[in-house]
Amino acid sequence: MSYLPARTGRHRQRYMDQLRLVAGCIPFRLEKIVEDRSCNLENRLLILMISSPNRDGLVFPKGGWEDDETMAEAACREALEEAGVKGILGDKPLGDWEFRSKSRQKSCSLEGGCRGYMFAFEVTEELDSWPEQANYVRKWLTVDDAFKFCRYDWMREALRKFLKVLPEGSTNEARKESLEFPMIPVADARAQSQKLASGCYEKPSGVQHLDESCNKCAVQG
């Protein structure tokens, strides 16, 4: 099966308050194990991260949110392009975090600033080939290892937020009914995410640095 090449360039990139808007996800799956009353949910939970050449640490799939897609669609696209996975996306972001792009980590200027929105993403399919396979390697990790290998502190904060919405000790089926936010199939993301497309939606608890006004959201070339 062939896929369209990964998007490149920033001519369709969205910006808000001079920050590049980024969408990404924390891909996860529940490992099948023998049921045990003493079993902790985190012991069954695996987190997918990706590595890039010549850089330490691991990251979650993420990338620019463009003007022809919803935030949810951008997160799903990045999961496919960078990690080669399909699945079920949370219909609300876990929160938003401000950080600098990897090429501007040591810069003090406004250029290179990003605001990233991260979603939970339950993996249902891993592809044998994907658009950016040459640049990224997939790694399934335990929760403890995921915290250790996060390249940036903001990713650890997003991971902590993610863990808060997973009821401890629940099975996969029960968890889908009791999550704080419902999960929606990727194919339905556009129909159910119209509010996200404009950047205006009900603010999740624990959101950091989220602008209270939607009027400042603009698309810059």
Image (tube, rainbow, N blue to C red):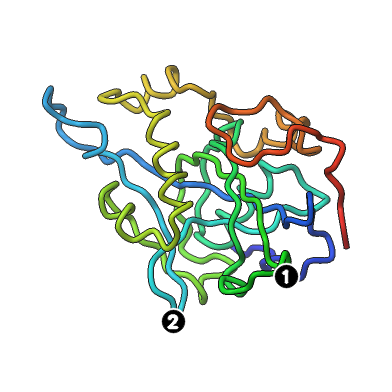
Query: Residue at image x 51%, y 71%?
Result: 133
Q: Which residue is mark 1?
A: 8
Q: Amino acid at mark 1?
A: Thr
> Between residues 195 and 139, which one lies in front from this camera angle?
195
Is residue 31 toward the left or the right of residue 93 in the image?
left
**The disc label shown at residue 59, or none:** none
- Mark 2, residues whose alpha carbon is within 10 Å: few (<14), some, or many (≥20)? few
Q: Amino acid at mark 2?
A: Asn
The quadrant holding residue 179 is top left
> Between residues 17 and 58, which one lies in front from this camera angle?
17
The quadrant holding residue 214 is top right
Element type at marker 1? Answer: loop
For residue 56, above or below residue 189: below
How far from the left and from the top, in percent, is residue 216? 85, 42
For residue 209, above or below residue 132: above
Query: Residue at image x 58%, y 34%?
Result: 185
Element type at marker 2? Answer: loop
Query: Residue at image x 55%, y 41%?
Result: 119
How far from the left and from the top, in percent, is residue 211? 73, 38
**Which residue in the rendered view is the most extreme toward the front?**
108
Is residue 47 toward the left or the right of residue 53 in the image?
left
**The disc label shown at residue 54, or none:** 2
The quarter of the rendered structure image containing the C terminus is bottom right
> Between residues 93 and 70, which one lies in front from this camera angle?
93
